[in-house]
Image (tube, coloured by chain):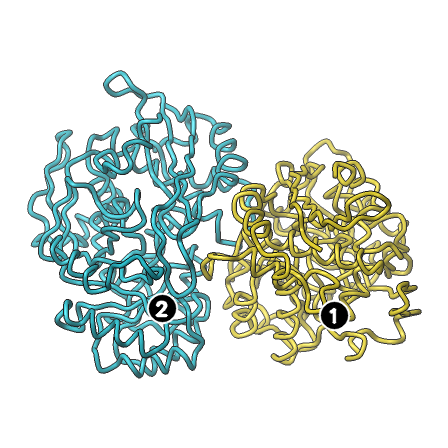
Chain colours: A cyan, B yellow
Amino acid sequence: MKIVDILNFRVPLSGQISNAVVNFSEHDVSLVAVVSDLRRNGRPLVGWAFNSIGRFAQQGIIEQRIRPRILAATEKSLLDCEGKGFDPSAVRACAMQNEKPGGHGDRASAVAAVELAIWDLNAKIREVPAWVLIAEHFGCIEAGCIEAGRTETVRTGAGRTEATRAASVYAAGGYYYPPGVGKTLSEELKSYQAMGFDRFKIKVGGAQLREDLARIDAAMKIAGDGKNLLVDANGRFDLPGALAFAKEIAPYSLGWFEEAGDPLDYALNRSLAEHYAGPIATGENLFSFEDVRNLLRYGGQRAGRDIFQMDAGLSYGLTDYARMIALMEQHGFDRRQAWPHGGHLINLHIVVGLGLGGCEVYPCVFQPFGGYSDACRIANGQVTPSQAPGFGLEEKSSLKPWLEKV
Amino acid sequence: MKIVDILNFRVPLSGQISNAVVNFSEHDVSLVAVVSDLRRNGRPLVGWAFNSIGRFAQQGIIEQRIRPRILAATEKSLLDCEGKGFDPSAVRACAMQNEKPGGHGDRASAVAAVELAIWDLNAKIREVPAWVLIAEHFGCIEAGCIEAGRTETVRTGAGRTEATRAASVYAAGGYYYPPGVGKTLSEELKSYQAMGFDRFKIKVGGAQLREDLARIDAAMKIAGDGKNLLVDANGRFDLPGALAFAKEIAPYSLGWFEEAGDPLDYALNRSLAEHYAGPIATGENLFSFEDVRNLLRYGGQRAGRDIFQMDAGLSYGLTDYARMIALMEQHGFDRRQAWPHGGHLINLHIVVGLGLGGCEVYPCVFQPFGGYSDACRIANGQVTPSQAPGFGLEEKSSLKPWLEKV
């Protein structure tokens, strides 16, 4: 059993949207196929994944550094101890051969795409949804991280699994559209409501304060309660700006205030936590265990209140992401404070498998990757993965043309 | 006056050397040519630079993200206010269009190569060595950062400059060679001594303690005094390992103990500074202003004693590097505590231009980039840049075949 090739496709994101700091129209994503020598229905069994959303494709790093290292590895070195699947941590280590410590940026998402494709491949070998494999691998069912009450059925072991574990989900959107697009923020959120969402996230910090507050007022009419509205500044503010904005939004009692300042400015985060009573959220732009450790040491995040948004697809994959969650718990936080960045199928399975707080989803933007497949059920602010093996990317119609290339 | 193209070449590093964590045999470097529409001697005037040493070439990021942004920019937006040269900070900002905050890794070195090539190009337009342009741009001559006593001649303004400012330099090497290469550490250091060096750096942490101490003993015989011997663990140790090693080397009173632990483990650095009296050095694997700010806030570095090794070629270029130096000074450090990583011509000009502590050089390894050109004088532990315009890469024979490609 071996990996015979690693293919990567540079897939452009559709849409002309902006947050407070970037326009996404030139963003792209690496869709990765790890091709095994196993076969299903006469075709090679392939693990698929991608490096989340919001950064860039990593063709150079994957083709020039990662692929040659993995294809040069001995067959056995990449297998798990029982030889029944591939070892994601061994693949991760192989991908990082002769890479120096520090500098966790583009490399972290390139490695992540490959490591996550291994999880998809392993789940397909086992013929289970990825979340089942993830829950078993990290001992989450035994440890009670997955609450029995929220899991309708989990039957594993007999080669088939029926599971309808649901996760909390909110609809992320509320971007700044260019003039002339003609859609209003209210229309956008109402369309999410019609899809079954009851919690929403909108962008702030990209306009004048008065306009942002008007956007919040408009969104509150649909969200109903402040706890169902989240705002995201994408790192736009310095400390005085963050504190001033926090003061303005305090009366709304919002669900959370996300990425007020630079993701590495832990002192800013700490000051904000000291001055703003509501939950704050950060972490989506921390791409390593070491960076998250610094957030935990210096960022002043509050147990039981603040939110951690690290994204496996941007930070070396699930092996490292699970280490981050364990470290959070060692620092006295609850894993339900983790709501990963990146609203897509891969993180849905990670949230369900690890029993995290919940996930975001981009129902309309960031196609072909954003949102779930038609086979996932969304109702009452909950989403339920389908029974497809792996992450179920094959069920997402927008991705189909790409997946058919292998 | 405009940039007509940005070319990049993926240049392999020669050699089979290792430090405590990586083998460099598969490392490569991006050599970048910023081609202007100006002409000299009937040929296009080109700015050359590269993304330092020790990480990897960044073909994907340069070709897919940076080059299209810069070539799409309006001509005027990239020029300095007087229109006599290009504005490195504007080129840096253009290269970073629609890039999110955080994640300072491969991108930082891709941007750096392009930004540094702008400095080379500007110096060639002015027909001065790069260090003169750098010193003028950052006001270092007026501010007295460049000590008069160490600058033999600085005459600028009349279109020509004669300058023989020297910088302190040490020879870096002392790697772990694979068995059978046949060279000993003593022979290596003696060869550096014969070249005019009197201070040396060797690798530690990649072997058993006893072997490392034997290496230090051997090196001490050539260095003579502990202050002339530096040791580099390349981030190999955890905290107990770092403290144990520090205890063993304390009696040698070494020049410095470099990168004991992970570059992002500021708490480890702080503990080491509390327990080890000798100078400690770190920072070569911090690739942004924000990361350096965290080192300054949390790392426990000691004013007047410890060493900062950030490298412009790995961290968005000289624009950002100069901001780091200014921040160091705001935190009470002296710029002579800065000794950039990366022993090559570009950092020699930066050290001389900004009046920093000094530079390392790899006289024999990391070719074709390591070391200086024959036109640079090395004597008594000092190196003097040549009179060539720009960084003088054209005078380095190992680079010539590459530079002739444009």
Secondary structure type for disc 2: loop
**In terms of depth relative to the viewer, which is nearer, A50 or B192?**
A50
**In terms of depth relative to the viewer, which is nearer, B254 or B65?**
B65
Q: Residues within 10 Å of mark 1 (few under 14, many from 20)?
A: few
Q: Is residue B55 above or below residue A198?
A: above
Q: Which residue type does callout 2 highlight?
A: Ala
Q: Are marks 2 and 1 in contact (CB under 8 Å)?
A: no
Relative placement, left or right, of A395 versus B75 is: left
Horizontal and vertical percent for residue B105? 53, 53
Q: Which residue is mark 1?
A: B137
Secondary structure type for disc 1: helix
Q: Residue furthest top?
A: A42
Quarter placement of the N terminus of chain A: top left
Query: Disc 2 sits on a residue from what chain?
Result: A
Q: Which residue type does callout 1 highlight?
A: His
Q: Is residue B192 above or below residue B318?
A: above
Q: Which residue is found at the position 52% from the left and 31% from the top?
A: A68
Query: Disc 1 sits on a residue from what chain?
Result: B
* Res. B257 visible in picture: no
Quarter placement of the C terminus of chain A: top left
Q: In this rendering, do the residues under marks 2 and 1 share a single chain?
A: no
Horizontal and vertical percent for residue B112? 63, 55
* Res. B150 visible in picture: yes
Relative placement, left or right, of A323 versus B1 is: left
Horizontal and vertical percent for residue A215? 26, 71
**In terms of depth relative to the viewer, which is nearer, B67 or A355?**
B67
Q: Which residue is mark 2?
A: A233
Q: Residues within 10 Å of mark 2 (few under 14, many from 20)?
A: many
Relative placement, left or right, of A158 versus B23 is: left
Q: Which residue is found at the position 29% from the left and 28% from the top?
A: A84
Q: Which residue is found at the position 65% from the left and 56% from the top?
A: B115
Q: Residue furthest front?
A: A180
